[in-house]
Amino acid sequence: MVALADVDVGLSFGMSCSQYPASTSRGTTLRFARTVTDSTASFMAFVFQNFSLPPGDFILLRPLSLANSSTMLPPIRLDSNTYHGSFHAPPLSTTSVSIELYTNHSTPILSPPSSTAIESTTNDCRGSFTVVGYDTHLEGGGEESVCGTDESFEAACFNDINPIHRVMYLRSGAIARLVIQRGGFLYGCTGWLVGSQGHMLTNNHCIQDATDAANTRVEFLAQTTLCPDFVTTSDTCDRQMGCPGEVYANTTKLFVTTNVDLDYTLIRLDPSVVTRYGTLKLRSFASAVGEPVYSVTHPLAWGKRMQYKKNGSMAVVQATTGSELQYLLDTRKMSSGSPILSLQDHSVVALHHAGLENCPNFGVRSDLIVNDLRAKKLLPVNSTVDS
């Protein structure tokens, strides 16, 4: 997990209560637009304050250019049903955004307030918003390591006729890129679906509580559609928030339980995600040293990557401890929460969460997570290989 870099605070614009336009009889009308461009950005995540729009009014964040996507992204809508006060807007993979305010003819026309303050909680304030900056890249984080040369590949490279690759690729649909908003910062992690009811596992140090769960952006299929040819880089996703996928739009993100010692958190999404993206199962017994394993991860919030070989041989469990498996699979910051799967039965044998500077990397044993969830009577339905 890593935190986003400090916000660009040189930017500030918006509308105070006294500046906010009255509604008109012309239906939904564009009343304000401002373009922000940053040619160095991998993505742009705008920071709002004093956000208080009347019902029917909304702001569109409209991408005007491509940062690391082959297709133009749809705009993001911000309205009072979902947003209020201070928050980070969802990140957009673009270098230029138009921030547009639309008012609706059904919005009541109220008298302007006597105060010119940006923020007001009085009933006579038609509306207000302030953009105070934006984030463009991710920095910092804990220790997670590339073991020599990075031998992971874009997930699309496993979508071929090799039967082992094909099963690995089909399993990878259940893995998601996570962005968590906490304390004015954004954090990147990886998570994955488990069981048949829409549950998702990640690390405790990624999602710590119910507030984190509610403030987590879940993005599936954030990956390239084609395997790069190693000559051009047009199909690579090795940029932060690269290769935008499908953002889980449902507001259902229920916090179920967490365990600090085992560094896991279980949340629950709408069950429909299982039909759309698939799901994984946990191994309910300890993996053995030498068992071949593979990883599916979003390192540095890049597009999805996978790996099952190291130095020309199968990657295997190097050692086991009281609570962890050790392996030489390549990881980076924000790989936290990734599943480590058995190449034998494709069950999850560990929940990746840390590494040493020069390797190995470590994952919490899946059987310990299963035992803890069973003891709490919170083990998701159909979530283990013996269920």
Image: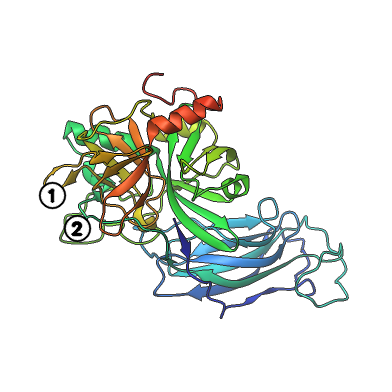
Query: What is the crowding at mark 1: few (fewer than 14 residues within 10 Å), some, or many (at least 20)?
Result: few
Q: Residue furthest bottom?
A: 10
Q: Secondary structure at mark 2?
A: loop
> Along the horizontal axis of the image, is 263 left or right of 229?
right
Residue 279 seen anywhere in this rendered image of the structure: no
* Image coords of residue 149 (percent x, y): 18, 58
Residue lying farthest to the left in this orientation: 312
Image quadrant assignment for residue 50: bottom right
Q: Secondary structure at mark 1?
A: loop
Question: What amino acid type should be assigned to the residue bearing mark 1?
Answer: Asn
Left or right, 311 with reference to 303: left
Q: What residue is pinned by disc 2? A: 148
Instruction: Please determine whether, in this image, residue 190 is positioned above or below residue 196.
Output: below
Where the C terminus falls, by quadrant?
Answer: top left
Q: Residue at x 48, y 42 (%)?
A: 261
Q: In the displayed structure, would residue 138 be above or below residue 310?
A: below
Q: Are marks 2 and 1 in contact (CB under 8 Å)?
A: yes
| Residue 290 point in image, percent of width and height | 19, 35
Residue located beneath label 1 in the image: 311
| Quadrant in which the N terminus appears | bottom left
Give the residue at x 50% y 32%.
198
Please tell me which of labels 2 and 1 falls first in the chain: 2
> Residue furthest toward the top?
387
Return the x and y of residue 258 as percentages of the image width and height.
54, 40
- Which of the 4 image quarters holds residue 56? bottom right
Question: Which sits in the foreground, 375 or 193?
Answer: 375
Asked whether, in this view, residue 179 is left or right of residue 161, the answer is right
**Measured Cα–Cα span from mark 2 to mark 1:** 9 Å
* Relative height, residue 383 to residue 295 (above, below): above
Q: Position of residue 51 (x, y in %)?
A: 70, 63
Amino acid at the residue labelled 2: Gly
